Image (cartoon, rainbow, N blue to C red):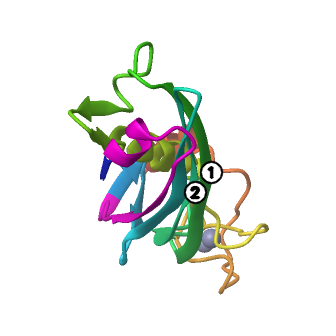
Amino acid sequence: MKINISSVLKNDGAVLPLSGAVEPGTLSYLGNSFTFASPIRVEGRLQSVGGTLELTGSVKGEYTSFCDLCGAPVSGTLAADFDERLSGDLHGCDEECFALNGATLDISGLINTLIWSSLPMKVLCREDCKGLCSVCGCNLNETVCNCKTGPYDPRLAIFGGGEN
Ligand SMILES: [Zn+2]
Ligand SMILES: [Zn+2]
Protein backbone atom coordinates (compact mmCIF):
# COMPACT_ATOMS: atom_id res chain seq x y z
CA MET A 1 0.00 0.00 0.00
CA LYS A 2 1.65 3.18 -1.24
CA ILE A 3 0.99 6.75 -0.10
CA ASN A 4 2.17 9.97 -1.68
CA ILE A 5 3.33 11.96 1.33
CA SER A 6 4.69 15.05 -0.45
CA SER A 7 1.98 17.33 1.01
CA VAL A 8 2.79 16.16 4.53
CA LEU A 9 6.54 16.47 4.05
CA LYS A 10 6.15 20.11 2.88
CA ASN A 11 3.67 21.33 5.48
CA ASP A 12 4.19 20.66 9.15
CA GLY A 13 0.89 19.83 10.78
CA ALA A 14 -0.69 18.68 7.53
CA VAL A 15 -2.96 15.67 7.79
CA LEU A 16 -3.32 13.04 5.12
CA PRO A 17 -6.20 10.59 5.39
CA LEU A 18 -5.29 6.98 4.66
CA SER A 19 -7.75 4.68 2.99
CA GLY A 20 -6.97 1.48 1.21
CA ALA A 21 -7.35 -2.23 1.07
CA VAL A 22 -5.19 -5.30 0.84
CA GLU A 23 -6.23 -8.67 -0.51
CA PRO A 24 -4.32 -11.38 1.32
CA GLY A 25 -6.41 -14.21 -0.14
CA THR A 26 -5.76 -17.31 1.95
CA LEU A 27 -3.11 -17.28 4.68
CA SER A 28 -1.74 -20.44 6.29
CA TYR A 29 -0.86 -20.01 9.93
CA LEU A 30 -0.11 -22.61 12.61
CA GLY A 31 -1.64 -25.43 10.60
CA ASN A 32 -4.85 -23.58 9.90
CA SER A 33 -5.96 -21.54 6.90
CA PHE A 34 -7.61 -18.13 6.92
CA THR A 35 -9.48 -17.13 3.78
CA PHE A 36 -10.34 -13.49 3.23
CA ALA A 37 -13.10 -13.45 0.62
CA SER A 38 -13.14 -9.65 0.55
CA PRO A 39 -10.26 -7.19 1.01
CA ILE A 40 -9.01 -6.12 4.42
CA ARG A 41 -9.78 -2.42 4.86
CA VAL A 42 -7.05 -0.05 5.99
CA GLU A 43 -8.18 3.31 7.43
CA GLY A 44 -6.16 5.91 9.19
CA ARG A 45 -4.26 9.17 9.00
CA LEU A 46 -0.77 10.45 8.54
CA GLN A 47 0.29 13.71 10.13
CA SER A 48 3.55 15.58 10.18
CA VAL A 49 4.33 16.93 13.65
CA GLY A 50 7.61 18.78 14.08
CA GLY A 51 9.39 16.72 11.44
CA THR A 52 7.98 13.42 12.71
CA LEU A 53 5.40 11.48 10.76
CA GLU A 54 2.63 10.10 12.94
CA LEU A 55 0.85 7.20 11.36
CA THR A 56 -2.29 5.94 13.08
CA GLY A 57 -5.15 3.78 11.95
CA SER A 58 -6.64 0.34 11.86
CA VAL A 59 -7.11 -2.72 9.69
CA LYS A 60 -10.26 -4.77 9.62
CA GLY A 61 -11.36 -7.81 7.67
CA GLU A 62 -13.54 -10.90 7.80
CA TYR A 63 -12.13 -14.39 7.39
CA THR A 64 -13.31 -17.95 7.32
CA SER A 65 -11.27 -20.69 8.94
CA PHE A 66 -11.76 -24.13 10.49
CA CYS A 67 -12.17 -25.32 14.06
CA ASP A 68 -8.90 -26.80 15.37
CA LEU A 69 -10.76 -29.63 17.08
CA CYS A 70 -13.67 -30.67 14.84
CA GLY A 71 -12.89 -29.01 11.49
CA ALA A 72 -16.17 -27.10 11.26
CA PRO A 73 -16.06 -23.82 9.31
CA VAL A 74 -15.62 -20.78 11.53
CA SER A 75 -15.89 -17.13 10.55
CA GLY A 76 -14.14 -14.40 12.43
CA THR A 77 -13.03 -10.79 12.32
CA LEU A 78 -9.47 -9.64 12.13
CA ALA A 79 -9.04 -6.16 13.60
CA ALA A 80 -5.93 -4.34 14.73
CA ASP A 81 -4.73 -0.79 15.31
CA PHE A 82 -1.42 0.77 14.44
CA ASP A 83 0.31 3.81 15.88
CA GLU A 84 3.74 4.51 14.44
CA ARG A 85 6.19 7.41 14.61
CA LEU A 86 8.67 7.99 11.81
CA SER A 87 11.31 10.65 11.73
CA GLY A 88 10.84 12.80 8.64
CA ASP A 89 13.86 11.40 6.85
CA LEU A 90 12.91 7.88 7.94
CA HIS A 91 16.23 7.34 9.68
CA GLY A 92 16.07 4.58 12.21
CA CYS A 93 12.74 3.26 11.03
CA ASP A 94 12.09 -0.38 10.49
CA GLU A 95 13.03 -1.09 6.89
CA GLU A 96 10.88 -4.18 6.78
CA CYS A 97 7.80 -2.13 7.59
CA PHE A 98 8.40 1.05 5.63
CA ALA A 99 10.02 1.98 2.36
CA LEU A 100 10.35 5.55 1.12
CA ASN A 101 10.90 6.12 -2.56
CA GLY A 102 10.93 9.84 -3.32
CA ALA A 103 7.70 11.06 -1.76
CA THR A 104 6.05 7.66 -1.91
CA LEU A 105 5.82 5.83 1.39
CA ASP A 106 5.09 2.13 1.14
CA ILE A 107 3.46 0.76 4.28
CA SER A 108 2.74 -2.73 2.89
CA GLY A 109 5.28 -4.23 5.27
CA LEU A 110 3.61 -2.64 8.27
CA ILE A 111 0.16 -3.80 7.18
CA ASN A 112 1.36 -7.34 6.43
CA THR A 113 3.12 -7.62 9.79
CA LEU A 114 -0.01 -6.36 11.52
CA ILE A 115 -2.26 -8.85 9.73
CA TRP A 116 -0.01 -11.83 10.49
CA SER A 117 0.37 -10.88 14.15
CA SER A 118 -3.41 -10.52 14.49
CA LEU A 119 -4.34 -13.98 13.23
CA PRO A 120 -5.68 -16.10 16.09
CA MET A 121 -3.39 -18.86 17.40
CA LYS A 122 -6.39 -21.00 18.17
CA VAL A 123 -9.67 -21.37 16.27
CA LEU A 124 -12.67 -23.01 17.91
CA CYS A 125 -16.22 -23.30 16.56
CA ARG A 126 -17.42 -22.81 20.12
CA GLU A 127 -15.71 -22.64 23.47
CA ASP A 128 -16.78 -26.11 24.57
CA CYS A 129 -16.20 -27.88 21.25
CA LYS A 130 -15.92 -31.61 21.96
CA GLY A 131 -13.91 -32.31 18.82
CA LEU A 132 -13.79 -35.59 16.93
CA CYS A 133 -13.84 -39.06 18.47
CA SER A 134 -10.27 -40.36 18.45
CA VAL A 135 -11.52 -43.86 17.59
CA CYS A 136 -14.26 -43.54 14.96
CA GLY A 137 -13.74 -39.91 13.92
CA CYS A 138 -17.35 -38.85 14.40
CA ASN A 139 -18.10 -35.25 15.40
CA LEU A 140 -18.85 -35.43 19.12
CA ASN A 141 -20.74 -32.13 18.97
CA GLU A 142 -23.35 -33.79 16.76
CA THR A 143 -23.26 -37.47 17.66
CA VAL A 144 -22.67 -39.69 20.66
CA CYS A 145 -20.76 -42.82 19.72
CA ASN A 146 -20.11 -45.98 21.73
CA CYS A 147 -16.35 -45.82 21.54
CA LYS A 148 -14.37 -45.80 24.75
CA THR A 149 -13.09 -42.28 24.48
CA GLY A 150 -10.77 -40.56 26.81
CA PRO A 151 -8.14 -37.99 26.20
CA TYR A 152 -6.62 -38.99 22.86
CA ASP A 153 -3.41 -40.95 23.37
CA PRO A 154 -1.54 -41.91 20.20
CA ARG A 155 0.46 -44.61 22.07
CA LEU A 156 -2.77 -46.52 22.79
CA ALA A 157 -3.80 -46.26 19.16
CA ILE A 158 -0.49 -47.84 18.11
CA PHE A 159 -0.77 -50.70 20.64
CA GLY A 160 -4.42 -51.31 19.80
CA GLY A 161 -3.62 -51.69 16.12
CA GLY A 162 -0.67 -54.04 16.75
CA GLU A 163 -2.61 -56.67 18.65
CA ASN A 164 -4.62 -57.91 15.71
ZN1 LIG B 1 -15.28 -27.46 16.77
ZN1 LIG C 1 -16.34 -42.91 18.31
Ligand 1 sits in quadrant: bottom right
Q: Is residue 72 above or below residue 142?
A: above
Residue at 37% x, 47% y is: 7
| Residue 5 visible in the picture | no
Q: Are marks 2 and 1 in contact (CB under 8 Å)?
A: yes
Determine the residue positioned at 40% across, 37% down. 9
Seen in the picture, residue 61 relative to 29 is either above or below; the reply is below
Check the image and report above or below for 133 versus 141. Answer: above
Q: Residue at x 55, y 75 (%)?
A: 74
Residue topped by disc 1: 81
Q: Residue at x 42, y 22 (%)?
A: 94
Quadrant in which residue 143 is drawn: bottom right
| Image spot of residue 150 (x, y percent) | 74, 55
Tell me where residue 84 appears, x and y as whole percent.
57, 35
Pointer 2 residue: 58
Q: Is residue 105 left or right of residue 64?
A: left
- Point out residue 136 in the picture as x, y percentages from the top left corner: 52, 70
Q: Residue furthest front?
A: 11
Residue 142, located in which quarter of the rendered image? bottom right
**Could you tell me if residue 8 is visible in this image?**
yes
Where is residue 104? Give x, y as percent: 26, 42
Magenta-highlighted residues: 6-26
Q: Secondary structure beneath disc 1? A: strand
- Give the CA separation, mark 2 to mark 1: 4 Å
From the viewer's side, name the closer residue of 118 and 46: 46
| The stretch drawn in magenta includes residue 48 | no
Q: Earlier in the sequence, mark 2 or mark 1?
A: 2
- The amino acid on which the numbered mark 1 sits, given as a three-letter code, is Asp
